[in-house]
Amino acid sequence: MNTRNFKCFQTVYEERNLQAAANKLFLSPQGLSKIIKSLEEECGAPLFVRTKEGFVPTESGKVFYEKSKVVSKDLKEMFSSIEALNDKEKRFKIGFSIGTIRAIDVAIVREYMRENPQILASWHEQENEKVIKQVLNDEIGFGFVIGKPEETKLNAVKLKSIDVVLYVYNGHRLWNQSEIELADVKNEPIISMNERYHIYQDVINACRMNGFNPDIVAKVSEGQSIYQLVKHKIGVGIAPRFYNDTEHIKGVAIKDAYTWDIYGIYRKDTVDIDLVEKLIGKFKKEN
């Protein structure tokens, strides 16, 4: 018996209507009807009574439904357990700090993962400090992070640098400037990435070093939101240069501004140095 057909039977049982069930399953009514008939033939008993009102389950159908739900649950748990064990057996895992997936060449990492099946292909972003901690604790073999960690147990290799700029809207007093001082935004409403991003604290610290506290009017979770808020003149945005200039918004260079640096980090005593060097080599080749 094809256990995948359990879902088909269960949907017909719950909907009591062949057309509605077929729509839910993205099947034709004819194809679904054949599956139900095949199950009835295997069981040697009718599972439904076909009426004008719909499909009414027989006593055999009720038993089949209850038992098939148990079997489906057991199968789902079995496959989940196997998947978890398979992931656990993959000894080399990669972590991403928030914002790094947007900045790096994803194609390079994807190709690398395909070439090395022992790597757990996971694309979850986490806070910078959490990724650093996971590498230190040997929970993951390699991490993409923002900024160079001051950890003696880690090696850090700069993989990419992106200029941090001031995004302004057309008509803003700084629109025609090619470069500004950070102090020029002293009295400006500022849009920034939120606290989960490394750049948030960097912006605050940089402003304070220039003698003022920034007036942050919006904290967002992704760069597109900065673009939209600046476009609608909510304020100016300080962020890595992710977007090309348009007739509505442009990125103005900030004099002496730091760059948004992405580092690859790994333990100095890693047993997977070959895998680490292979990944770093791919990024160096790109540059």
Image (cartoon, rainbow, N blue to C red):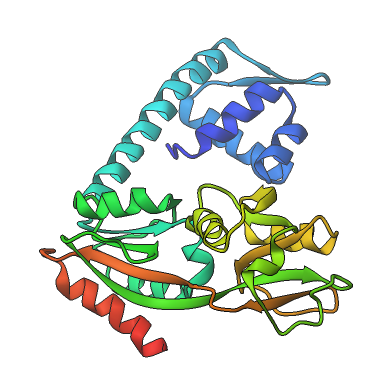
Where does the image place residue 269, in percent across and percent down from the top left? 10, 64
* Quadrant of residue 75 within the rendered picture: top left
| In front of the other: 136 or 84 | 136
| In front of the other: 20 or 218 | 218
Where does the image place residue 23, in percent across and percent down from the top left? 73, 40
* Quadrant of residue 214 within the rendered picture: bottom right
Q: Is residue 258 above or below residue 27?
A: below
In the figure, is residue 177 to the left or right of 200? right
Q: Residue at x 49, y 16 (%)?
A: 66
Q: Residue furthest front?
A: 211
Q: Is residue 134 above or below residue 143?
A: above
Where does the image place residue 126, in percent across and percent down from the top left? 43, 50
Where does the image place residue 243, in percent across and percent down from the top left? 67, 74
Q: Quadrant of the C terminus?
A: bottom left
In the figure, is residue 135 to the left or right of 235? left
Q: Residue at x 59, y 35 (%)?
A: 8
In the figure, is residue 110 to the left or right of 8? left
* Quadrant of residue 244 within the rendered picture: bottom right
